[in-house]
Amino acid sequence: MTEKTLWGIHGGKTGDADSLFLKKNRIALGWVAAGDIGKWKATREAFKEKVGEAYKDKTPAGVVNSAGQLYRFVHELAVGDLVVYPSKRDRQIHIGEVTSQYEYHPDIEPGYPQTRTVKWLKHVPRTRFSQGALHEAGAAMSFFQIKTYADEYIGTLEGAVPETVPAGKDETVGIVAAEIDETTKDFVLKRLAQELKGHPFADFVAHLLNKMGYRTRVSPEGPDGGIDIVAHEDELGFKPPIVKVQVKSSEDNVGDPVVSALYGKVSAGEFGLLVTLGSFTNQARTFAKSKSNLRLIDGDDLVELVLQHYDQFDSRYKGLIPLKRVFVPEPIEEGEE
């Protein structure tokens, strides 16, 4: 198969650059405040500096992300490279060949002044491609390189028109679903780790337990004797079971000494619960398995509980972890169709 570099590009969140792309045969990026980026010194560091100057409200990570996309568009995208544009207007995948170097044209479409000309070679319905290929072309960035499923796109230009794979037999569906699940999990854990260090994490876990049907008492900030939360089912806290909870906002592994110390504070008829954003060592897990009234919740388990009870969270925690309910495809097992 011909060696080609394949890029993906988006035309805005609602496809507002669709006409520019398909009728005027130009692919383009926004970043209007940046001006003519072709005049910038051709180094990544220079692009980061210029983006930082033009967009002072961007975070350091946002500056790096934007600068990287702009640099690649000007200096790495070459004439003859292929580009994939998934249109939100006609629901087709448009594949073309780049035909010019970078050109600054605020006169053609003011919202998308960073441009390249393109010759469109093929227009293929989205349904022809695997879910994995569509997912890669739907990356969150405006401009990016397509690598994993490049052959699937390039094959359409070399006569291998993709057959419509039945949704139930598309092996990439499970891969895409797993990637979405992992991305969500990473996001939730990152937000909790960054925003709820120390005592605020105990408040969050108590809130989660409330939504699970428990009443809770959170220890005041400061020395707590190893018990951060006491949870119970009745209003006064007399009715068993009483759950003594310790939380760890660290992302490190929690070892057996910490777990054993918590269990030492659990009396007969009580339960112990240790919640961490990180994980547990094998020794800690082995110890917990030997105790019927001790439960460990690591970061992965915590995310599962957060997702189960998210709709019940108050606005403060929904604002801290902004999530939107989406439907993710699941692989169809043999015999289900």
Image (cartoon, helix red, strand yellow):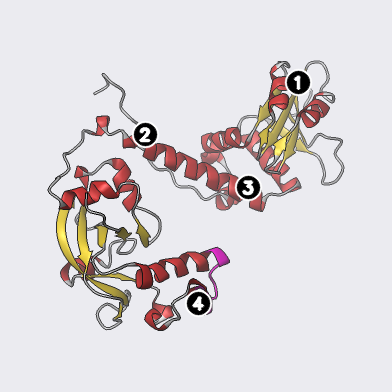
Viewer-nearest of discs 2 and 3: 2
Q: Secondary structure at mark 4?
A: helix
Amino acid type, mark 3: Leu
User: What's the magenta region?
Assistant: 48-61
Spot occupied by residue 53 in the image (x, y as percentages of width and height) = 53, 79
What residue sits 40% from the left and 70% below the top?
Answer: 70
What residue sits 45% from the left and 66% below the top?
Answer: 68
- The numbered dot on residue 192 is 3
Looking at this view, name the residue that lies furthest to the front. Answer: 2
Q: Earlier in the sequence, mark 4 or mark 1?
A: 4
Q: Is residue 325 left or right of residue 234?
A: left
Viewer-nearest of discs 4 and 3: 4
Q: Is residue 40 left or right of residue 221?
A: left
- Marks 1 and 2, how far apart in space? 45 Å
- Marks 2 and 3, how far apart in space? 27 Å
- Answer yes or no: is residue 234 visible: no
**Residue wearing tag 1:** 239
Q: Secondary structure at mark 3?
A: helix
- Marks 4 and 2, how far apart in space? 41 Å
**Residue wearing tag 2:** 174
